Amino acid sequence: MSRIELSVLGCNIAIDCADPHAHAVVMANYSLLRAQRDGPAVLRYAIDRDKSSEQFLLSSDRQRSSTTSDDAELLYLLEKDITIEVQKLRADLYFVHGAALELADTGKALALIAPSGFGKSTTAWGMLHYGFTYLSDELVPLDLPTMLVYPYPHALCLKKYPPAGYPVPMGALHTSRTIHIPPELMPSAACSQPVTLAAIFFVEYTPEIREPAVEPVSIAEAAARIFANALNPLAHCGDGLDGAVQVAKSVPSFKFFVPSLNPTCRFIKNIFQQALLKTPLC
């Protein structure tokens, strides 16, 4: 039995792995979140493997066990539970489903918000090659009073190989259905401290267009979109709607129509830099 100790947004987590493959998968996904913990674990998990059926067994101290024969599903189940439980423990933060990146050395972050399958993580991977650093590809944990985004630097998860020019690095974790790129293999070091949110891009994959396009989003529409992607709205005033309105009023938002990765990354960076300088869009 081998124990992995994590710290996720200040929450101490212990994962006991009896299976070597499960241990390697979890270690690769959470490598940058391993830490010397200050205090006892508030979340505890155990992963084992049935020798006769080859099924993984995931259990916690709060719920019944789950079984799967698939390493991608095992990682999904573990990460889903950690995400839900950390939201409960850090109810002070407003969680939005999206990716977050800092423009290097500016202290300013952008959020990419889109439903699953719209290329959010692939776009985030591309942006890391254009002078951005990594906060998260899955969660935007936001402190509403300060508009600070807290880092959640687990491995960036891709469902398919990215386009040429953005190769998956050697050492990335390949499960049965996903590719996970640990932060230490990224083009630049991941953020370790909170960063101020400066803009939001609502990504819409539009393969029929030739060039990326952008439209400013009104405060009302931005609030509705943020609220639709909020993960813990009931923990906040007005069932989370007040928080969505606050975010929409605090930072500019854009609808971003994405044809492919190469022009998209350059275009997003240009628009973001204009937003930082408060330059009107042409």
Image: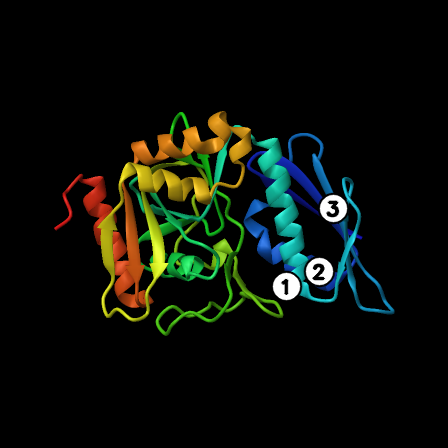
Name the kind of residue labelled 1 in the image: Ala
| Snapshot quadrant of residue 245 | top left
Q: Nearer the viewer, residue 97 or 275?
A: 97
Q: Position of residue 109 (x, y in %)?
A: 34, 42
Name the kind of residue labelled 3 in the image: Tyr
**Mark in the foreground, 1 or 2:** 1
Q: Could you tell which of marks 1 and 3 lies nearer the N-terminus?
A: 3
Residue furthest right in the image: 52
Q: Could you tell which of marks 3 and 2 lies nearer the N-terminus?
A: 2
Residue furthest left in the image: 282
* Residue at numbered disc 1: 72
* Residue at numbered disc 2: 22
Left or right: 35 in relation to 125: right
| Snapshot quadrant of residue 162 | bottom left
Give neighbour class at mark 3: few <14, some 14-19, many 20+ (Cα, 10 Å): many
Residue 36 shows up from this direction: no
Q: Position of residue 98 (x, y in %)?
A: 44, 48
Q: Position of residue 11 (x, y in %)?
A: 62, 35
Q: Nearer the viewer, residue 40 or 211?
A: 211
Name the kind of residue labelled 2 in the image: Ala
Q: Report if the CB atoms under discs 1 and 2 are less than 8 Å apart.
A: no
214 over 229 or under it: above or below? below
Residue lying at 70% horizontally and 34% vertically, measured from the top left: 42
Q: Secondary structure at mark 1?
A: helix
Residue lying at 46% horizontally and 71% vertically, measured from the top left: 161
- Mark number for residue 45? 3
Q: Could you tell which of marks 1 and 2 lies nearer the N-terminus?
A: 2
Give neighbour class at mark 1: few <14, some 14-19, many 20+ (Cα, 10 Å): some
Q: Nearer the viewer, residue 241 or 16?
A: 241
Q: Secondary structure at mark 2?
A: helix
What whole-number distance in Å separates the C-alpha atoms at marks 1 and 2?
10 Å
Q: Position of residue 24 (x, y in %)?
A: 67, 60
